Amino acid sequence: MAAKLCFFPVGNGDMTLIQTEDGKNILIDCRIRDGEEHPDVRSQLREKLSRDSEGRLFVNLFIWTHPDSDHCDGVSDHFHLGKPENWSEKSDKIFINEIWSSPIVFRRHHAQNHPLCDDAIALNTEVKRRVNLYKEKGYLDGVGNQVLVLGKDENGKTDNIPYILLELDNTTSYINGESSSVFQARLLGPSPKKDLDELEDKLGKNHSSVIINFELKGDNKTAYFLSGGDAEVVCWEGVKDRLSDKNEMSWLDYDILQTPHHCSWHSISHDSLSQKGDDAKTSEKAMEVFNRAKQNAFIISSSKTIEDDEKDPPAYRAKEEYEKITDDKNGQFLCVSDHKKNGKNVPLEIEISSNGIKKIAASTLGMAESSNTVVNRQGGGGYA
Amino acid sequence: MPDCLKKKIDQLNKILAPYGARKLSNTELSILDEKYICVWELSTDLVFNDDSIVLQIRYKSLTQHDIPEVFVSSPVINVCQLPHIEKNGKLCVWPNTYIIDLSDNSYVLELLSDAYSMLKKGIKGDLRDDFIDEFQNYWIYHCNKIERVISLCDLNIKNTRLVYGYKAKTLGWIYSDGEQKLINWLDNQKLLSSNSDNSNARDKHLRQRQLSRIISIPLIFFENAWYPEQYPRTIRDLFNLINEYHNEPDIVDEFILKSIANIYNRNPTVLIAFPTPSGMNIIGIRISENVGDRHTDRYDTRAIANGRFHINSLLDGHRDYINGRILKNRIGELKAQNILVERNDNSWIMGRDHNPTYKKISEHTVAIIGCGSVGSSISRLLIQSGITNIMLWDEDSMKSENSSRHLLGFDSANKNKASALASKLRLEFPNTNIEYFNEEWSENAESSTRITEADLILSCTADWNTEQQLLSKQSQCNLGVLVFAFVEAHAMAGHVIVNQIDSGAFNAWHYTQGEKIGALRYPATYWKENTKKRIAACAGEFQPYGAIPLANLHSLAARTIIDLILNRFPDSSFAYSYLGRQEELVELGGQWNNCWINKFGNPNKGDRIISLIYENSSWMNNDA
């Protein structure tokens, strides 16, 4: 059976569903907005989920990379937050078996006085509820209460919860308390709190995010999916330095990369595009990370359509840099917003199977939409 | 990369993305057979021989007018495995006649969609008949013998027969139904030694030797064309096809065996003809060796060069008689050398078998009196319209300065116009029978009576005396229609007059006595000054006019002759007049002539054709 990755068309934001070969649904971030101007990602997501024995539409795991609204929009309205027993059939929200979240990212976000949106506050409250319940009970009390803390928190705050803690550079194959043979996640970020205030200050000022390299198996094919939320250039440089020191750069090897921060230039460079223009340079260290692409790798920008303009994100220059990488590896750079069927945005799906790692076409050529107004098949009637 | 290209790549990326397209890397581009600037690859749900079909859309330059090519990049599908697949998996999707709005790049989806549908139908077998409809496209890929072979054979004759062939060093093999027809063609192409009365004994001997090399070979007519899997690889395959699909296999086999047994037939070939829904086809299969050739190593090269080995080896073990079955077996294992045959029969040349009037036109003989700037071009137009039999009269020689409006050019300077024209037309149209007479046609001319062989006579002399003699001859000998073609000064008007026998139409157009004898009664143009220019020679003068207005008369005259052949105006005398542009006329110092205006109306701005009819001994406007 195949494993699948599904990138929902949420514009500049992330909402990515991993469907493992053994049937687990893992959602990374969410961005569900109301309004006809937005693709109906709510329905698109719900169509892909199944119901548990209690009739609840559910995800096995929700991974929250960081608390920006474009990574948690609509979580309160469309996901059940709170005690499992309070799930209501009437509201029929999506039930979350387990949540993974990082206190360091949250803290860094908070430290910079970024205002938190209501959804971020609600989701953070839910994470805390689960952690506190664990602390209270000393065990994870079933689906709906499961939680994993990503990375040690400062001041020993996570020292007493080793069972629900995934430390940096470590891996886990556990989902909902069960080990999976077809899934593994290696936590590569956020970097721990730095002793040097200057460094910590830099980390805080940059978008910080959970960075995970997922190992997914479909049939006997293994694919590595590197996802880093909105992590910006300092975060990637930190990862590079740490793994170089450990001589473990291969932990970054990927078949599929989700461009950090929706193809933002700031994830690959310290230079300002608006000030330096064509002279703006990429960070060598950060690019060392992104150059870990394997042969035929996909780089996917979960963003709006990338135009050759001044906007950032998504930045055209960043796209060009990523395209250099894919070109070098006979790979493919894709933008989720370009993926359409009958003119409407649909999820971009990658399948991992014995056929390899393939993008699933949204439309088939036999049904190609052609305007039939661009070709005169009768000819012009003039001959020479 | 320039911004405009980047922009187009971005656009195409967006258009193709939903279909799972992947842009090939530079490394992948570098290993393609040809240079492409950008290629996208798309997987499909189509399967051929258990493999999924992957398409590529390839751009060479990405400029607006760079229409991409579609390829099957995987699996490898050979030509003829599926219809419309060319070398290296290239798909032949759209004909050149399609016009694309290149400002809208989304046409690429329509192109890919059509490619997809075509492949789908092809895999399903729904396009199998395309192998027959477009037979030549597929046969060409199985042609393993590169040699020019020309057929003059009439493919309207749908039976198996022997045809004649001759190998010319410069052109390759030429085959024709009739020996005389073949010789005429070869003579027209100057491939045989001269046959004229002036030829010397050596030439005559040479010609005799050349003609002795004409051999006969079978042309086998099949009721149906072959599918690619039936294309013969060995001569045995050919015999099997004959056995399976021909009504009279024994007779055909005998034709082939006899042809091979001919010691002079050193390149035994079989022509195959069959109909397809899109027309008749003819192909060739060469038998790679003459039976004798198979034993060449046993004989010394001098003997081989002298041709003696043929007899010896053919009769090897079968000195007096060789059984057909044994001979068939001997050659059965030989490789079939498949050949493209170039059709040069007139039915093909004159309208690709689709010209319903060709046959009738080709049966007529036209005599052209006067091969100057009028007659020469009309003769060529008539040949292009299907006339094959032409007689030319002119005793004048071509001068260099004639070439500005004559069909002939500098290469014919100082040659007799009729002879040079015949020579040129024979080379260009070797199926014609062109006779020329290097003399001015007159009642007393040696060739005078030959004109009675013509169905139509075209006079392009603008010479009153000659034309009066022609009228007289027409009347005396009950000749066919006489057509006169001439222009007025500067070719600002041109007239084609059809004179039925004893009609008096031509003379009614002219003064026939007195000081104006031979002058036009109704000239269309009037010139205050004499338009003729003097040249420094005895009675030397010429009438200047240009090739462009003259071309109107050429087409008008040729059209009139074809109309007459096709009986479009039975038994009437009529005329067409071309009137040039008034602006040009005035610029040259002329104006419309009152004689014309009073008779046929004011041409005003001119640039038109006037149809006139001769009735009740008078010319009148036919449009009135």
Image: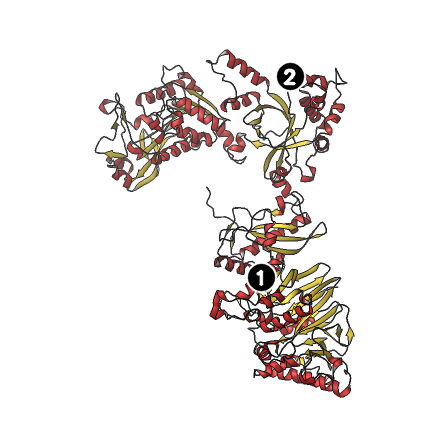
Numbered badge on residue A14: none
- Residue B380 in the image: state x and y as whole percent: 43, 30
Q: Which residue is mark 1?
A: A323
Residue B332 position (above or below residue B198):
below
Left or right: where B67 falls relative to B376: right
Q: Which residue is mark 2?
A: B306
- Residue B273 in the image: state x and y as whole percent: 63, 32
Subunit of label 1: A
Nearest to the observer: residue A160 or residue B309: A160
Visual colour scheme: secondary structure
Q: Hey, which quadrant is residue B496 in on the image?
A: top left
Crowdedness near tag 1: few (<14), some (14–19) or many (≥20) residues, C-alpha within 10 Å: many
Nearest to the observer: residue A353 or residue B562: A353
Residue A325 position (above or below residue B191):
below
Crowdedness near tag 2: few (<14), some (14–19) or many (≥20) residues, C-alpha within 10 Å: few
**Amino acid on which disc 1 is placed:** Glu
Nearest to the observer: residue B160 or residue B173: B173
